[in-house]
Image: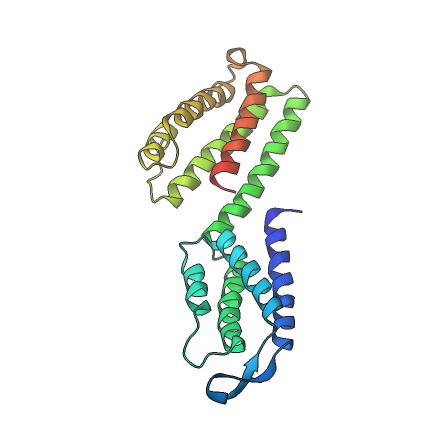
Amino acid sequence: MPASKLVQKRFDELTEAAKKVNESAHSEPGIYGKVDLYVDQQIFLKWTVQVKDLISRTCGTDSVHYQEFIEAEKPQMMDSSHKIFRRLNSVFDAVKEDFEAGYLISTRNLIQAEVFDTELEQAQEFLRLNYKVPAAVIAGVVLETTIRELCTKNSIAHGKLDTMNADLVKAGVYNGIVQKRITHLAAVRNSAAHGNDVEFKTYDVKAMIDEVEQFIAAHLS
């Protein structure tokens, strides 16, 4: 199952779990003897932990969504567990809506990574059929597009691949060793694009596809 569909499935599961938390609400004497609504503490805690994990994975711990969830979790004066749940559930609903509308940057990365996976599968199929040139070109396009995505994410201007590669190192996105590997892979792509298939071997393209896949997993997924 594609990653974005797994995330959607998890949102749906936790939406159903939220209904169970709400259904567990019951009256109890609260602070100063006031009767208020409380929810089952065990299923509430389980739901809270799972939602917090999902938000951190989908939005990141520095996001407004995650920080609002943390803030909503803090008990306020005259609070009951049901009131806390309602605040948290409101944040959860907001995250779910933004996810489904495609407004989350990390979600965009997730979907882009899926597109790249499909394209790399095409490159692997070309290579299996001994068409190393189109395989190298496709892998190279995926590599450069990934570099552009990282530049966008880090507010770095788009330009030539070598320039973007160097700028990403300066920004601390990855180190000089990764930079050198990207330069090497770009050289293979350029040779393929210009029809110079004698300048690289089939195993170079195989390594290229593997490295691009690992690079995407490390920086976009």
Q: Is residue 22 left or right of residue 186?
A: right
Residue at the image position 66 percent from the left and 19 percent from the top: 130
Closer to us: 135 or 74: 74
Judge from the rendering whether residue 165 lies leftward or rightward of residue 89; answer left or right. Answer: left
User: Could you say which is closer to the camera, residue 79 or residue 172?
Assistant: 79
Q: Residue at x 59, y 70 (%)?
A: 41
Q: Position of residue 57 (x, y in %)?
A: 51, 51
Image height of 190 relative to 173, above or below: above
Q: Residue furthest top?
A: 198
Task: Give how far across and how far down residue 147 sits, in percent.
Answer: 43, 35
Q: Residue at x 57, y 41 (%)?
A: 115
Residue projecting furthest to the front = 32
Given residues 63 and 69, the one toward you in this image is 69
Position of residue 180 measured from the top left corner of the image (x, y, whole percent): 40, 23
Query: How many badges with numbers are in the image?
Result: 0
Name the spot of residue 217 as percent of width and height, x first: 53, 37
Q: Tell me if residue 127 comes above or below residue 26 in the rendering.
A: above
Nearest the camera: 149 or 9?
A: 9
Rendered image coloring scheme: rainbow
Q: Quadrant of residue 61?
A: bottom left
Residue at 44%, 61% in the rendered image? 65
